Amino acid sequence: MVPAEAAGVGPAAVPLRYGDDPYVWACWLYYEESRTQSEIAEIMGISRATVNTYLAEARARGIVNIALEPERLGALSIAQALKRHFGLEDCLVVPGDDGARPLIDRLGVAGAQALGRLVQSGDTLAVAWGRTVLSVAGHIKRQAQDPRLQDVTVVQATGGTRADIAYTPELCAAALARALGARLVHLAAPAIVSSPALRAGLMAEPLIADQFATLGRANKALFGISSLRPNSTIQTSGFFEDVSLQDYLAKNAVGGVAGRFIDAQGRPVAGPLDGRTIGIELSALAAIGLRIAVAGGFDKVPAILAALRGGYANVLVTDAATGRGILHAEGVSEGEAKARQRAESAGPAPLTGPRTHIKKFLNKADHVVEEMLDGAVQAHAAHIRPIGGSNRALVARNGPRPGKVGLVIGGGTGHEPCFLGYVGRGLADAVAVGNIFSAPPPAPILACARAASGGAGVLFVYGNYAGDVMNFEMAAEMAEEDGIAVRTVLTTDDIASSPREDREGRRGVAGNVLIFKAAGAACERGLPLEACAALTARANARTYTMGVALEPCSLPQTRRHNFELSADEIEIGMGIHGERGVARDRMMSADAVVDRVMDGIFAEMEAKPGDRVAVLVNSFGATPLMELYILYRRVAQRLAAKRIVIARNWIGHYCTSLDMAGASISVMHLDEELEALLAAPCDTAFLKV
C-alpha cells in the first residue's frame, strides 16, 4: 500500500519511464543515482518516512535485492539513454519476458499506460492506424466515474480503406474514442484515391475541410511505426491495395509513419502516391506538440530510428531488445549512457533549509515559452497574429499598411507584457520573440520586417544587448537584400549601467516602453523613415531609468533564484535580466529608495522649472500596485519640488523580470513633439491611449 502524505502535500507525478510505479522510481534514485533519502523525498514530493517505506517494501516485493531487478534495471537504463540521446520528452521501455505474452500485447499495455498519463481534458488526439495502435486502445482502462478527463477529441489521422483488416484507420480511431470517452471525428475520404485531381476535389469539400481543420488543431498524436520488410503490416495489410511499394524501396525508404514513407534519416521519400494520399502530412505531424510512437520488434529498428532522427516522435514506447538495437545502431553503449546519466544526475548538493525551489504554474519547464506564447496569441487575438504559423514572430492585425514606416521591436521572453504587449495600431507593427532573457534569432526578425514593410522602410527599435544587436543587424542586412530599407535605434535608458559619457554603452530597460510609444506614433503619422528614426533617437536620449531589486527572480528551468540577496539587502541599479547594479545597500524606506533613484536621474536630466515629463513606475514582476503607488507618490513629490510637471504617467507591470521583487522608475524629459507622440492614440493588448 502506498502511504498517504501529510495534508496539503501532494506527491509528484511518476515519470513515464518508471512505469507509473513509485517504488521503482524511488529504487532508481536510491540505488542507481545514489541520491539520499532526503533528496528523493524532495524530488518525489513525499516525506522522508515514505521514501524509507518505499525502499523497504521494494526489497520485500523483490523489486530490489541490494540492486534493482536486472530486467527492470535494463529497461530503465535503455529508456534513460534513449530519452537523453534523442531529446525525447519521455520514453517507456517494456522489459523482456519469457515469451508468455506476445510483444504486441505488452506494447499495448505500455502504450495505454502512457496515453492514460499524457492525455488531458480538452486535448485533440490525432490517431493513426495499425495493429499496435489498436492494441493500445484495447488495453486502456477507462474510469467512467472519473470526471477529470473531459472534452477530448479523437480525430482520424489518415483516410479510410476497404482493406479487410481489423485495424483500419476508422476502427483504430473509433476504438480509442470509445476507450477515452472522447468525441470522434472521422476523415470521410479514402486514404488513397485514384488521381491528384480527385484528391484536390475531395479536399475542397466543406465536410472534409472541416475534418482536416480539426486534425490541424491536434495537440497530441498516437501512431505506430512500420518497417518495409515483406511481412510487415504495411506490406501485408492491403492498405495500399495494388500500389507497388518497390518505388519507395528503390529510393531507400526504410519505414512508414501514418501512411507516409521515410528514409534512414527520417526524410520524406517521394513516390507514386504523392498527390493521391489523404491524411496528415509528415510536416504537420512533426509540428504537433506531443507525438507518441508505440512500436517494437527488432525488425523495426531501422524504421523507428528513422522516425526518431526525423523528429516525428518525442515520446517513445518500445521494448528492451528494440531499444538496445536503436542505441547500438547510433553507437551508444548502455555503459556509456549509464555513466553519463550518473554524472549528470549527481548535480550540486541541495541547498540547506526548508525551501529549495520556487513554486510556479508550469507543465514542463522546457515548454514554458511556447505555452506562454500560445496562450498570449489566443488571449490577444484581436491585436496580434503569428507570421507564417510561428509564435516567435507576431504581427499587428491593424498595424502595417502601404506607405507607412513599419516598426519592429523584439527581445527575450520573461519581461511580459514587454514586448508582445505593445503590438498594435499606433505602436509596434511586429515583434520578434526570443527565449527567456535571450535575443530572438535573425529569422523571426526578418519575418517581422517583411510583414511590417509597407514600402516606406522599417524601423528596428530594441535594447542595447550584444545578442540582440548581432541578430537584429543580421536581419537588417537580409531585409536590405530584399529591398527593405532599415534604420535602427538602440534603447539605452538605464543610467546605472554605464557612465553618462558612455550613453551609447548603456542597456535598454523599462524606458523601452516610452520610447516604443514615441516611435510608434511617429510611424503612425506617416513620417518618412529618417524622421521616424530621428524622433525615436531623441526619445531615447531624453529617457532615464533606474531599477532597484528587493528579491531575485527565478528561472522556470531551475526554479531557483538566479542571484542572492540577504534578508536586509537591496540591489540599486539592477538590470532586467538580473545584471548587477551599481551598489548593494541595506533595506531602506520606499521614500529613501525613490530619492536614490531620482537623485541619479536629476543628475543627468537637465530640466528646469516648468518643464514637462512622462513618468513610468514599473514592477519587476512580484511588486504589487500598492507598493508602486507608494513609490509614485514620492516621485511626484520630488518632481513637484522642482516645479517639473508630470504630463503623463503609467504605473504597473510594463517591463518585468519574471518574478523579481523590485521596481524601476523611468522619466522622459518631454518637448512639445515628444509629448504629442506620447498622447497620440494607440491600441495594443497592454497599452491603450
Image (cartoon, helix red, strand yellow):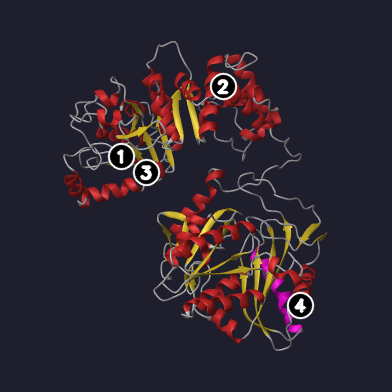
Give yes or no for residue 626 being in the magenta stretch. yes
Q: In the rendering, at what x and y percent does residue 23 appear?
A: 58, 24
Helix, strand or loop at disc 4?
helix
Q: Amino acid at mark 2?
A: Glu
Res. 238 image quadrant: top left
Q: Decide: marks 4, 1 in contact (CB < 8 A)?
A: no
Q: Amino acid at mark 3?
A: Ser
What is the span of residues highlighted in magenta in the rendered image?
A: 624-641
Question: Residue drawn 76% across and 77% down?
Answer: 602
Mark 1, residue position: 157
Q: Decide: marks 2, 3 in contact (CB < 8 A)?
A: no
**Mark 2 closeness class: few <14, some 14–19, many ≥20 residues within 10 Å:** some
Distance between the alpha carbons at the discs numbered 2 and 4 = 65 Å
Mark 3, residue position: 283
Q: Decide: marks 1, 2 in contact (CB < 8 A)?
A: no
**Number of the label disc, if any, that sits on residue 269:** none
